[in-house]
Amino acid sequence: KSQSVSVYLHQIVNHLVEQGILEPQIPTYSTERQRKVGDFKFVIIKEQPADLIVNDKLSSLDRRLIGGRIYLQKITASPISWYGLEFSNVIEESSPLFITQDQDQYLIQKKIYHRGRLSKIEK
């Protein structure tokens, strides 16, 4: 069954406006009369699995399960059509599947031994 997220959001926001929780945001141009709220912009986050192979912190089972989920996402309906957003303002953003933090490299200064004469500091 198709989910109409845009319709649900309009119903929720209209209810909040009627309760006085939100102020009306009447658009200048609209196809509906007495519209109290403007349009919504939806952001769909698309996970990029490029780092799945190089992530050595995952077990092979976890890697296969995540790979299977990504495969199912590719062969099923897109989130835009699933949530009924075909005629809405939708932006697709890419995000890495994993965010890893590299260890910071620190420099350590070691004492330097010199065969020549001793400096004034070392005497």
Image (cartoon, rainbow, N blue to C red):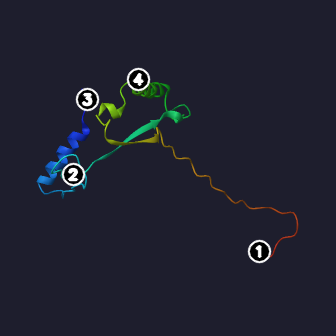
Tell me whether circle 1 and circle 4 mark residues in contact (CB < 8 Å). Answer: no
In this view, the residue in front, 62 or 117, is 62
In the image, is residue 45 above or below residue 72?
below
Pointer 3: what residue? 2
Pointer 2: what residue? 37
Q: Amino acid at mark 2?
A: Val
Q: CA distance from mark 1 to mark 3?
A: 80 Å
At a point 80% along the width and 76% down the height, the residue shown is: 120
Tell me whether circle 1 and circle 3 mark residues in contact (CB < 8 Å). Answer: no
Q: CA distance from mark 3 to mark 4?
A: 17 Å
**Secondary structure beneath label 2:** loop
Mark seen at residue 121: 1
Which is closer to the viewer, label 2 or label 4? 2
The percent position of residue 71, horizontal first and vertical second, equals 44, 25
At a point 25% along the width and 29% down the height, the residue shown is: 2
Which is closer to the viewer, label 3 or label 4? 3
Q: CA distance from mark 2 to mark 4?
A: 35 Å
The quarter of the picture where the N terminus appears is top left
Q: Amino acid at mark 3?
A: Ser
Of callouts 2 and 4, which one flags the residue occurring earlier in the amino acid sequence?
Answer: 2
In the image, is residue 38 above or below residue 82?
below
Which is closer to the viewer, label 1 or label 4? 4
Q: Residues within 10 Å of mark 4 (few under 14, many from 20)?
A: few
In this view, the residue in front, 18 or 48, is 18
Pointer 4: what residue? 75
Q: Amino acid at mark 4?
A: Ile
Tell me whether circle 2 and circle 4 mark residues in contact (CB < 8 Å). Answer: no
